[in-house]
Amino acid sequence: MKWVIGNWKSNGAWSQNEALLVALKALVCENTRVGVCVPFPYLAQAQRMLQESKVLWGAQNVSPFGPGAYTGEVHAEMLCDFGCRLTIVGHSERRQYFGETNAQIAEKIQRLNAVAITPIWCVGETLEERERGAWQDVLRQQIVEVVEIVGAAAVENVLIAYEPVWAIGTGRNATPEDVAAAHGWLRTVLSEVGARSDLPILYGGSVKGGNAAELFTVEGCDGGLIGGASLSAMEFAAIVAAA
Ligand code: PEP
């Protein structure tokens, strides 16, 4: 079973979303789990448009706190009110622009687990880290620091998204060899820390209709997290068809 999940990032407008959600709802996804992570203000719209379909929806972030005096935060129970089944944590854009740490990611995973929303836990190295040969250490640290806090049992139901930062939004996707090596390494690290090594691991980074099939057929690749191409109904449909 493959997964194809869209990440709209900070894009969308009520009127545009309507057409995109109609197209999503019409997708035939027999052997593929399809989902979309939308900005908070559009969760109600996604819920209304997708609730009678097989397409799942969710958010792109969640508060590491529960209810209370945390101005501007959206906590996990609120996401339940909008029928979210998935939510991204640790996206590289949140790590880079908002200083999201592995400790916060651990907290967010626990908050989502508590309300049975599947965390999509993003990991990945920067170009500089890859070029100095540190990608394995970086991925290991991203996994280990979270599992040390939450314990292996808390990551039993997550989806991992391997998203090399240099491939996100750049048009330069990782090669099938890169994906095989990274997913294999992540599985090694997961088993070292006592976690399930057969967790679904999605690839993310410049996936399009034209390269999805070769990336998704890599051994150990369970589908994709799709940024830019999820904003085009045609492109996203081609990616789902390729899965
Ligand atoms: C992402 O934002 O998770 C992503 C993979 O982006 P893109 O597909 O645009 O590279």
Image (spheres, rainbow, N blue to C red):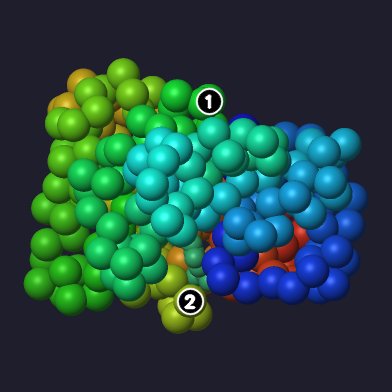
Residue occupying image coordinates x 22% and y 48%: 102
Give the Cα distance between marks 1 and 2. Answer: 30 Å
Q: Position of residue 150 (x, y in %)?
A: 24, 28
Q: Residue 22 location, x and y as percent?
A: 88, 57
Give the label, 1 or 2, closer to the camera.
1
Image vertical order of residue 185 relative to residue 152, above or below: below
Of residues 101 and 239, the one drawn nearer to the viewer in this rendering: 101
Q: How crowded is mark 2: few (under 14 residues within 10 Å), some or many (20 or more)?
A: some
- Identify the residue shown where x is 26% and y is 23%: 152
Name the secondary structure under disc 1.
loop
Q: Which residue lies furthest to the front in this view?
A: 69
Upstream in sequence: badge 1 or badge 2? 1
- Using the rendered image of the protein, determine whether residue 6 is visible from the camera's viewpoint: no
Specify whether 6 is left or right of 119: right
State whether label 1 is within 8 Å of ligand 1.
Answer: no
**Is 205 situated left or right of 233 in this image?**
left
Disc marking residue 116: 1
